[in-house]
Each structure stands twice: as structure tokens, then as C-alpha cells.
Amino acid sequence: MPALTKEDLREQLKRRDIAPVYVLYGAETYLRDLAANTIANLSFNEGDFRDFNETEFSVAISDNLQPALAAAEQLPMMAAKRVVRIADVRVGATSNKDTLKEDQESILENYLKRPAETSVVIFIADELNANRKIGKLLLKGRPIAVEFPRLDDAALRKFAADKIRESGSEADERTVRHLTALTGSDLRRLSNEIEKLSTAALPDKLITIDLIESLVANSRELTNFELTDNLMAGRGEKAIRAMRKILDDGAEPLALLGLISYNYRRLLMAKDLMNQGVSRQELSSAVKLYGNKQEEFLTAARRTDLGKLSHAIKRIAQTDLAIKTSQGGGGTQGSRMQIEILVCELAIL
């Protein structure tokens, strides 16, 4: 079956034409994850017991594909459908970092030949090579495959303009161009900025270049969670640049360390709850996930393991002691050196 465009998928979903299997992939993860949420939302009717019928499995955890497909074979409980998300799918040009393995091809192929009619399975792929056999199964077999490429400048500006209108605000074309030039192609960040600007634009609801300059300039600075996200993804150079930017902007090393520790502990809790198979709602409540950072946080939790998180927390504690006892030199310079050593070590875990 040929891959659909985002627009094709949107039209199908408007008709509530829900397929039994989807494969969502591409560089634009914000729209990809939004599509996954929309499919899941439309799969349930009002009054359905969603908490009992929606589960997520990360295939970054070895041998998780079979239980995921087994869950899809189960009949829904007091609901129209069962929704199973299979996250962290990665099939590269070589098998080194694959999360779907060659020995799982038969399991996958058997399910795709006859998917359960009472379930909706959503594969969420970070990488999907069409030349590999298992990639072909997902892209050219029975599933509805939808690619989410990164937006070009024109599409980015249209996205921003549409978001501004949806928020009830107004902005002219020059203002939209200025905003997208500052935020770049990160749609999550762009959406967050528009939400903030729309609130600040009250009561006249007009977003201006002056308003953007006053609010978005500071928001361009990398946040601590972005630092943590780069660390968890193994993007060492980006993590180090983020850390240096935060410290150069005046953050206290101990305060930054406390924020890193806070995020790693929440990630550890989320990962443990994921492994226990708790519902997304229960997990979000336990880890105190609110607002539009939920998907970003859960993605970071899914793509690591408990051992890595535990080791990171141990190293954070050691760094805290080193700073407080002035190991390697006291003062801001010594503290900064300890933070830099920590970030470099965590980036290569």
C-alpha cells in the first residue's frame, strides 16, 4: 500500500475512517506524535473505558514486540477499540541500532497479514529504512504509512499563521516571518512560543514584532530540559553547547545541577512506570506531567533504560558532593568544571 501524505491522513480521520495499523515516521516528530494522538482519540467513543484499552510499548526494550502484538489481539474491554502504540521503532541502513530485529520479521509479518479488527496499532518510528526487509513490511505492506518530513520555510510560516489564528490572536505576514526566523523549524518550540505570545497579546490579541522581541529573545536560550533531552539522546556536542549557554547566561552551577537531577529522577520514575505497564494517565499524574511538554518528556524516557538513568543519578550525586567540598577547586570556576565533567560523561553513556 503506498504511503499517504499528511493531508490524505487528515481527510481520512475527518471521516473517522480508522485503519487497523498505522506507521508514522519522518523528521517532523511534533506532527507525527500529534497524528498518533489524534488517531488514538478518534478510536474511542464517548463513554468507552479508555484507560483499560490503551497501552504503549517501547521496542527499545528487547523482545517487546511480541507482547505488544499480543495485546492487540485481545478484545477491547467495554470500548469500541483497543489502541496499542509501538514506540521507538528504528530500522536503519544497517542493523546496529535497530529496535526491530530480523528475527522478529515473521512475528510482524504474521500480524500484518491479518491484523485484529478490534484494535488500532500505531507504529511510531524514529528511523525507517525502506531498503531493509522489515522496513518494507511496514512501509509497503498492509499498514497505512504516513511520512512527516520537516517543513520548508513556506509550510513553517503557514503552520505559525494557522496556530496564531487558532489561539484567537492576529499577526501580519512580516511578524510571522520574524517569529519563525527566531524559532527555527522546531514545531514544539514554535507552538509553545505562540501560546505564550497569545496570552501576552491580550486584550487586543495583536502579536507584534516588538512583543516577539520582548518575549522570544529570552526563550531562545536552551532550557534545562533541552539539555537533559540532548544528554538522553546521546547528542553530546549539543548537550555541551546547551550547558555552556545556560552557565554563560548566569545560571548557578548548583542550581543547574539540581534541575538536571530533578529531570533525571522524574525520567527514572517514568521509565519504571512504563515498564510496569501503567496507563498514560496514571503515569502523567505520578510524574506530574502537564501542558505541552508531555510528549517530549515521554519520548526521552522511552529511549533510555533504567541502568543508564540509575548510573546518571549516582554521578549527579557525586558531582553535588564534589562541588560542595570544592574538589578540583572552589568557587564558580571549580563548580563549573565539575558540571562540565558530568555533562561530558552523561553524554557518552
Image (cartoon, rainbow, N blue to C red):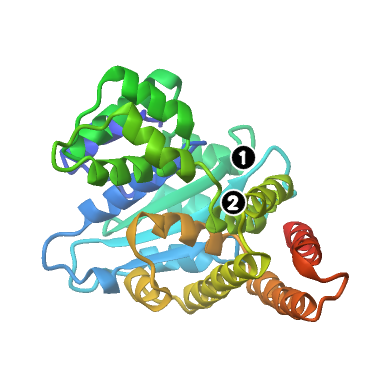
Against 85, residue 150 (above or below) is above
Residue at x 72%, y 47% (from the top left corner) = 95
Percent across and percent down for residue 36 are 35, 49
Against 31, residue 70 (above or below) is below
Amino acid type indicated by mark 2: Glu
Question: Contact (CB < 8 A) between labels 2 and 1?
Answer: yes
Q: Residues within 10 Å of mark 1 (few under 14, many from 20)?
A: few
Q: CA distance from mark 2 to mark 1?
A: 8 Å
Against 298, residue 143 (above or below) is above
Q: Earlier in the sequence, mark 2 or mark 1?
A: 2
Which residue is under mark 2?
Answer: 105
Q: Secondary structure at mark 2?
A: helix
Percent across and percent down for residue 10 are 26, 35
Residue 196 visible, this orientation? yes
Percent across and percent down for residue 224 are 56, 58
Q: Residue furthest right?
A: 328
The quarter of the image holding the N terminus is top left
Percent across and percent down for residue 209 are 34, 27
260 displayed left or right of 155: right
Q: Secondary structure at mark 1?
A: helix
In front here: 258 or 348?
Answer: 258
Which residue is under mark 1?
Answer: 133
